């Protein structure tokens, strides 16, 4: 095998051992895109080329890169106590972080269970839903309902309720007793909507159909993303989330909002639940919780859910669930430092003040070649491209590589470009991002 240095810093051989996630490994390794350093709004390639970050890493670096306070907090915590067991033991930063986090969630969601990722948060929330019904004597409520085109991570629970074909089709039977609501994407009626699309609230009524089919006494929970990110930035139609809330309440079904990408300021509020004025029974989170600096996830639950578990004998463990790294001290230290930055710099609501500028900028892409929809909310945008006949995803992938060559980082899923920049973005960065994207689109096949 060749050991000749590859453009960048790693040879083809050096790239071999790492089985890369959600990546076309052979294609990537033939032509790698490497990032070596990051600061503020930028990544830098190994040869020092700046890449403007249009996606906050992967929807997580909300406070921008290289924040000194996070680095110092993490270093301090590693030096003080790198690890502490979370089972039957505790450490102060975990309690402090929990207490501060539940002040950001909608009123009533005042307890938090820590995980290490969005996937773990989802599986934890689904387990809590099942266990909650059981501790209340409604153990027949075992069915879970997700949505087509939903993404809830890669655990067996998450892919079972998720609705992405490729994430499901090769992994066997998955969880039994799962149904899916229809997705809400309706290009014919909602294309080029600014903010929430007008049409589609009635799609929530499909939940009533499932209740009629199975009976509410068999249904535990519904899980949806308030804004679906990974399946192409799908905004909830006006009134849709409230309708889901009403139907869940009517039938005693728990409503879980998966806010792994919408949490921590992405929509202009700390959580999309607050932004949209619809309060679920649980919120799953991760990503912006630590600014991506240390893996961490969280599940926020309503007081009544927590309290239902606190009724047995006091020496009994109430929930047989947890991770070696739940409330990891280093993640907690990062989380606390991040919350300080969010508060000090007003980042959790900054998307609101930039919203109009962002909206106009992204909608200027209407009319660029191949663009069949532009959608936006907060500091989020989706730009949908017409696919090349017989080659789904190929056009957007070309956009990704061309964008990287031209110095911007975007994300693509299918033929949709997703933008979700760090919340520290300034107007001149928006101009650069959208200006470069305009050039990219003009050059696509
Ligand atoms: C809505 C949603 N849920 C869950 C996840 C999974 O998170 P993780 O990759 O941290 O497991 C993601 C990741 O993008 C997500 O967008």
Image (spheres, rainbow, N blue to C red):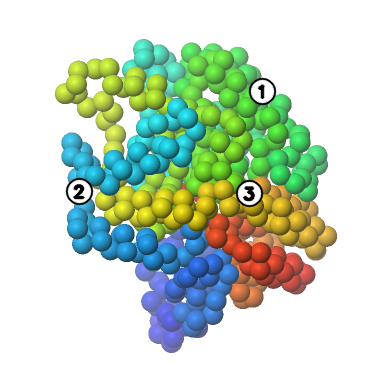
Q: Tags 1 and 2 in contact by the CB under 8 Å rule?
A: no
Q: Judge whether 146 appears above or below 118 on screen.
A: above
Image point (22%, 44%), residue name: 91
Q: Quadrant of the N terminus?
A: bottom left
| Residues packed near mark 1 inside 10 Å, few (<14), some (14 to 19) or many (20 plus) | some
Q: Judge whether 12 appears above or below 134 on screen.
A: below
Q: Residue 382 at what x, y percent from top left? A: 67, 53
For the residues marked 1 and 2, what is the alpha-carbon distance in whole angstroms? 47 Å
For the residues marked 3 and 1, what is the alpha-carbon distance in whole angstroms? 31 Å
Q: Which mark is residue 70?
A: none
Q: Which residue is mark 1?
A: 205
Q: Which of labels 3 and 1 is toward the front? A: 3
Q: Provide the secondary structure element on which disc 2 rests.
A: loop
Q: Tags 3 and 2 in contact by the CB under 8 Å rule?
A: no
Image point (38%, 76%), residue name: 14
Q: Which mark is residue 352?
A: 3
Image point (26%, 25%), residue name: 318
Q: Is residue 65 visible?
A: yes
Q: Earlier in the sequence, mark 3 or mark 2?
A: 2
Q: Which of labels 3 and 2 is toward the front? A: 3
Q: Provide the secondary structure element on which disc 1 rests.
A: helix
Q: Which mark is residue 84?
A: 2
Q: Provide the secondary structure element on which disc 3 rests.
A: helix
For the residues marked 3 and 2, what is the alpha-carbon distance in whole angstroms? 39 Å
Q: Quadrant of residue 128?
A: top left
Q: Residue 85 at what x, y percent from top left? A: 19, 45
Q: Earlier in the sequence, mark 1 or mark 2?
A: 2
Furthest residue in direction front, as rendered: 344
Q: Residue 20 at what x, y percent from top left? A: 44, 62
């Amino acid at each position: 095998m060749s050991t000749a240095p590859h453009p960048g810093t790693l040879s083809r051989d050096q790239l071999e051992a790492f089985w890369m996630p959600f990546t076309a490994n052979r294609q990537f390794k033939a032509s790698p895109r490497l990032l070596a350093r990051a600061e503020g709004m930028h990544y830098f390639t190994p040869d020092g080329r700046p890449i403007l970050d249009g996606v906050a890493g992967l929807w997580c670096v909300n406070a921008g890169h290289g924040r000194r306070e996070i680095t110092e907090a993490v270093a301090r915590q590693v030096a003080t106590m790198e690890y502490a067991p979370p089972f039957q033991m505790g450490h102060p930063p975990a309690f402090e972080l929990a207490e501060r986090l539940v002040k950001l969630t909608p009123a009533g969601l005042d307890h938090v269970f820590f995980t290490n990722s969005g996937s773990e948060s989802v599986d934890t929330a689904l387990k809590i839903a099942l266990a909650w019904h059981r501790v209340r004597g409604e153990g027949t409520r075992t069915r879970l309902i997700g949505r087509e085109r939903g993404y809830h991570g890669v655990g067996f629970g998450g892919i079972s309720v998720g609705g992405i074909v490729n994430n499901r089709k090769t992994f066997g039977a998955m969880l039994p007793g799962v149904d899916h609501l229809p997705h809400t994407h309706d290009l014919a009626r909602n294309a080029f909507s600014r903010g929430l699309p007008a049409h589609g609230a009635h799609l929530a009524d499909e939940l009533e159909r499932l209740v009629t089919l199975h009976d509410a006494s068999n249904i535990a929970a519904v899980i949806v993303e308030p804004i679906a990110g990974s399946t192409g930035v799908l905004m909830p139609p006006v009134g849709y989330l409230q309708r889901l809330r009403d139907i869940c309440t009517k039938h005693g079904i728990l409503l879980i909002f998966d806010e792994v990408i919408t949490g921590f300021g992405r929509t202009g509020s700390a959580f999309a639940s607050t932004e949209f004025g619809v309060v679920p029974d649980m919120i799953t989170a991760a990503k912006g919780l630590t600014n991506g600096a240390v893996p961490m996830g969280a599940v926020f639950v309503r007081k009544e859910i927590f309290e239902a578990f606190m009724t047995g004998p006091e020496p009994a463990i109430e929930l047989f669930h947890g991770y070696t790294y739940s409330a990891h001290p280093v993640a907690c230290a990062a989380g606390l430092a991040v919350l300080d930055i969010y508060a000090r710099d007003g980042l959790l609501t900054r998307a609101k003040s930039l919203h109009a500028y962002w909206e106009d900028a992204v909608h200027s892409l209407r009319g660029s070649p191949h663009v069949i929809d532009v959608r936006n909310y907060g500091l989020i945008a989706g730009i949908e491209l017409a696919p090349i006949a017989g080659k789904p995803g190929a056009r957007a992938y070309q956009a990704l590589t061309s964008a990287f060559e031209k110095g911007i980082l975007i994300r693509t899923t299918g033929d949709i470009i997703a933008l979700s920049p760090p919340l520290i973005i300034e107007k001149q960065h928006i101009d650069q991002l959208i200006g470069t994207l305009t050039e990219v689109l003009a050059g696509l096949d």
